[in-house]
Image (tube, grey):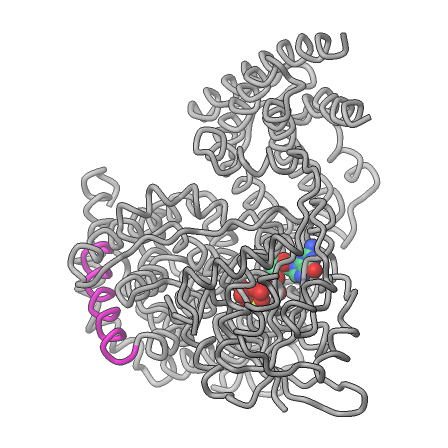
Amino acid sequence: MRILLMGHPNVGKSAVFNRLTGARVTESNYPGTTVDYTKGRVRIEGDSFEIIDVPGAFSLEPKDKAEEVAVKMLEENKEAVAICVIDASKMERGLYLALQVIEKGYPVVIALNMWDVAQDKNIEIDVEELEDILTVPVVPVTAISGEGIRELALRIKEASLVKIEKIIEKAGN
Amino acid sequence: MLDLEQRWELIDKIAKRTIKFGKYRHTLKDAIAEITVKPLTGIPIAIAVLYGFWAFFVAFAGFFTDGFLVKLFDMHWLPWLQEVFPAGKESWLYYIFVGDPLADNCFEAFGMLTSGLFVVIGVVLPAIVAFYLVLIVLEDSGYLPRLAVLIDTVLHKIGLHGYAIVPSILSLGCNVPACTACRILETKKQRFIMRTILAIFIPCGAQLGIMLKVIPETVGWVILYLLAGYFILGFILSRIVPGESPELLLDIPSYQRPTFSNVGRKLWVRTSSFFTTAIPFVLLGVIIINVLHLTGVIDWLATGLGPLLSGWFGVPKETVGALIVAFLRKDLAVAQLSAIEMTKYQMVTSVVLVSIYFPCIATFVMLLKEGGVKGFLGSLAALVATVFLYGGLLHLIWILLGVA
Amino acid sequence: MKNKFASVYFSIFGLIVLSLGIAELIIGIAGRSFTWGILEISGEFSLWKGIILFFVGFFYLSSVKNLNEIHQLAKNVMASIMLWIIAGMQIFAMITESIPGGEEEGWINTWEGFLSAYSPPYIPALILLPFSLVTVYYVYAREK
Ligand SMILES: Nc1nc2c(ncn2[C@@H]2O[C@H](COP(=O)(O)OP(=O)(O)OP(=O)(O)O)[C@@H](O)[C@H]2O)c(=O)[nH]1
Ligand SMILES: [Mg+2]
């Protein structure tokens, strides 16, 4: 099984990647740090999986060369599981891409990264409710300190395909 | 598939049910974040930050290079090597590895084990460590994109959006990753312009370090001249290259305290990649240049190109050796210039020439890889024109000032 | 009350910084040097240090009205940070110069040489440094 890290620029994909794999991909506090993909391996409960750090993209309609790589990675790995990394302090924006990936028919796990920042800003997110609506695993993560990374890894196998109609239905009531 | 509106509608619904925004006061950090991007306050702040950058660089590099390494190389390493080197002083082996037997400092000896090692470890290593350290702090704190917003107004005039400054600043560390970073620009035109002007005009950390050592009083003017060229060429290219340069709405991240572990890790990764890529090239450069000297190729070239060099650019014909080395490593080339006798003004011109004339081979390969053959040839054409016109212009300036 | 004091303090301090900045700027352009007591204006980058000090003074002065307001305070804090950049780099340079021995000498500086690197005269930013720490106190007191 392959795992792809998808998300907006600067939400901490490379940080999550480094924590999961022990690699040394560059993490910087500006959008557009990663412009090419990097492969790594992660061990979860004795199994080893290939995981790919992908350049940030705002949507699946690429605007620049880095975003093209992201979209290409998604298209080349039809069987992959996607970890959608979302900046918890700007969750709505991140959900856009996550929904697009779900619609494309990929099993998804959502990592609500920058959980520490969201808490500092007094933003409360009802993770259980979110999980219930989206019917995919949602894990709060703080990648720089490593909090939540273990749970994220353990829950990757729970990722499953969801129909967008089901999400609409659940969100509706 | 949903369309854009439907998707946002769905997100709205989800957000309403899952997110609660608590009370949030505007903090001091937010207020500071605001004033660093407003031009009136932001530009003075940027001047202070860049001053700090430079002052740190000078003090840090000076501490290691002038404080310890020059002594180590000139007073211990060089005499020891001159004494124990097994081959005779007249042999070509001695010439290649140790260089001039009469030299009393590692700048002038120009052997692989003397000047080669001295340039890499004695001068360039401390400089790039200092440079990377500040650069990484700028990257991790979140100041870099703010600088981009500030410079946006200027860059707009040359058809690039402000974000283009990010690759430019990265290229102060090394031009190679900077070429790759240009991928975040949207159109082919923008990427082409950016790659070309940064490869030609932005000196890398290694080169800055050695310039600081060789021409400490005039390095400021050299940088100013290069920067002016960066904008002029950008302006011209944006007029003549077909294509669009659309706007980019830049997302500015909030300030963060850089973490020790991340700064340390990045510093280590970049410094070790310097070791593996730069050292072989510098050592190889010394060997090649010494072999060319021994075989008389340099003399032959110097005689052939002499009229051009002294007539058009106003620099001594001996600089031809440095220009050849510049193709491999700029830092080594500047070091070589320092051993040639010339006036201060000729020195400035030749350092400028070394900077703008062919990017180092690693950058060259990147230009080809990122731009394709067509883009590469375009960059090359811009480069040749720049060297002749902009390099010649400096000579003209000296003539007009009456110092050439 | 505290507010009033801070405003008066930073008005005066700002004026002093501003004038020293202008002085450094002019001396920098002229390429001269100048010493008065423990104050010294000379050396490389006087021009740039002068420009920055000028703006530091300017920021202080423009922050004094309604200093308690967060945006005004931000200007004040930023002015102090700019001052600390100049002074901090000066101190860093002193440290790096004090440790290695001189040319033709040993690896490490002599004790006298070491101390003399820290003796006056100092550049304006260094002399102004302690007085700018009031900003820290003010921010701290305000949070409480
Ligand atoms: N406070 C906080 N900062 C984080 C967290 N995760 C990452 N960061 C920081 O956010 C910045 C961006 O992280 P990256 O991992 O480079 O982001 P990215 O998603 O790979 O970005 P691109 O490569 O540009 O798409 C870095 O400065 C990280 O240190 C987190 O959980 N909390
Ligand atoms: Mg990344």
Going 37% across and 68% down the picture, which residue do you hit? B322
Please check the rendered image and state whether residue C92 is part of the magenta-colored stretch, yes or no: no
Q: Position of residue B155 (x, y in %)?
A: 33, 47
Please check the rendered image and state whether residue B380 is part of the magenta-colored stretch, yes or no: yes
Query: Is residue B68 in view from this perspective?
Result: no
Residue reaching furthest to the front: A173
Q: Position of residue B150 (x, y in %)?
A: 43, 41
Q: Could you say which quadrant of the image residue B104 lies in?
A: bottom right
Going 44% across and 62% down the picture, which residue do you hit? B6
Decide if residue B184 is on the left or right side of residue B118: left
Q: Which quarter of the rendering shows the N terminus of chain C? A: top right
Q: Specify start and end residues of the magenta stretch as a single range.
A: B372-391
Decide if residue C20 is on the left or right side of residue C97: left
| Residue A70, placed above or below residue B122 | below
Q: Count of labels shown?
A: 0
| Residue B378, placed above or below residue B35 | below
Q: Could you say which quadrant of the image residue A14 lies in?
A: bottom right
Q: Position of residue B76 (x, y in %)?
A: 69, 66
Going 66% across and 11% down the picture, which residue do you hit? C7
| Residue B51, placed above or below residue A22 | above
Q: Main secondary structure of the magenta part?
A: helix
Going 37% across and 62% down the picture, which residue do you hit? B185
Query: Is residue B140 in view from this perspective?
Result: yes
Q: Position of residue B373 (x, y in %)?
A: 26, 80
Q: Which quarter of the rendering shows the C terminus of chain C? A: top right
**Relative depth, front residue between B72 and B153:** B153
